[in-house]
Amino acid sequence: MRKRVYVVYTGGTIGMIKGASGYAPSPGYLAARMAMMPELKDPMLPEYTINEYEPLLDSANMSPADWFKIANDIAAHYDEYDGFVVIHGTDTMAYTASALPFMLKPLSKPVIITGSQIPLCEVRNDAHENLITAMLIASQYPIPEVCLLFGGKLLRGCRSVKESATSFEAFSSPNFPVLGNVGIDININWRSVRSSKGDTQNLKVRELSELRVGVCRLYPGISSEFIENVLRPPLRGLVLEAYGVGNGPVRNKAFLDVLRKANERGVVMVNCTQCFRGGVDLTGYETGSALADVGVISGMDMTVEAALTKLFYLFSCGLTSEEIKKWTQINLRGELTPFSEHHSQEQKRDSFLN
Ligand code: ASP
């Protein structure tokens, strides 16, 4: 029997056509093109239902309300299909891929997010390959995770980042092995795939309703007034993109004071590195430990996308600031590497646990 896949079509370049002011989504176009593809009639590939959203969005226009719509759509069709493909623009794909794992639990079927850099309407494109491979993986590979499939790489969604604005290999997961490589063969790295523990029915959706969380990147010259404005109420959480292993301008006492006061008000500040690869260790330098002393916590090796959506999630669960600080540093969906797995940081683990 052919497998069945539910396709959520949210928009993105993949189904756009060129108009007077550039590429824009075109209702009905992608579904019509897919209906004409002989590959999608092959018994290897699944039967599918496509739900085209209205309006189709350039993903730069997406918000957490759109993630909630996608999550609910998947949950509403969960029992009838073997897997799910989410067709999405690339610009905020890594954010959606980071948010959905927190919103959908317990996941026991593949949710594969894909899109393309060049639309299907162009003669030379990456849309065809990404689409067919996503359909194949969603139907034939029982990976119980939200994944991002792009340019021949299958990535854990909450580890993914968009790394290139122009390359066909636009995404990577710098702090986690790829879940699969697509070449002549599709090779899944099963050792890195999470197992679906326990309840495989009853998929539940958590809305990300508490959005008073932001992101701020440190830069030489950042003033205490600037960070004070960022941290003003009603903000409840902040991802602080710091330097290197989590360092900041701590000789600026007014700057540190602003952070201390925010911490005392219950604002949760999570330190993520600006570096493309690697994580945070606030014990490494004075410039990091001084941040820890005023209440900033380590985001370890989470991407900014994962840290942000995790804070949305934890605040939406109604936890206290102290509980959120604790859970931020615990691996919930494969979004961070627990310290015990950081072999190179093994000695530093003790100071973390004390
Ligand atoms: N702006 C487009 C989007 O994110 C880019 C793309 O899909 O590649 O929807």
Image (cartoon, rainbow, N blue to C red):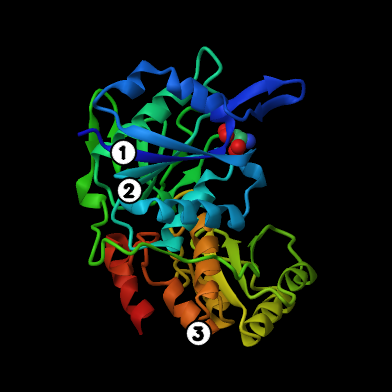
The front one of 135 and 241 is: 135
Q: Residue at x 43, y 51 (%)?
A: 74
Question: What is the quadrant of residue 121 in the picture?
Answer: top right
Q: Which residue is mark 3?
A: 322
Give the side of residue 188 with respect to residue 25, left or right: left
Q: Which residue is mark 1?
A: 4
Decide: few, some or many residues near mark 2? Use Cα within 10 Å; few <14, some 14-19, many ≥20: few
One can see residue 278 in this view: no
Q: Name the spot of residue 283 as percent of width and height, x first.
A: 45, 73
Q: Name the spot of residue 82 as percent of width and height, x first.
A: 29, 44
Label 2, secondary structure: give it: helix
Give, as a three-letter code, the residue at label 3. Glu
In space, the residues marked 2 and 1 are separated at their CA atoms by 8 Å
Q: Name the spot of residue 349 as percent of width and height, x first.
A: 32, 73
The front one of 171 and 216 is: 171
N-terminal of the two: label 2 or label 1? 1
Whether 330 is drawn above or below 48: the answer is below
In space, the residues marked 3 and 2 are separated at their CA atoms by 40 Å
The front one of 7 and 144 is: 7
Q: Residue at x 55, y 74 (%)?
A: 315
Whether 302 is drawn above or below 168: the answer is below
N-terminal of the two: label 1 or label 3? 1
N-terminal of the two: label 3 or label 2? 2
| Quadrant placement of the N terminus | top left
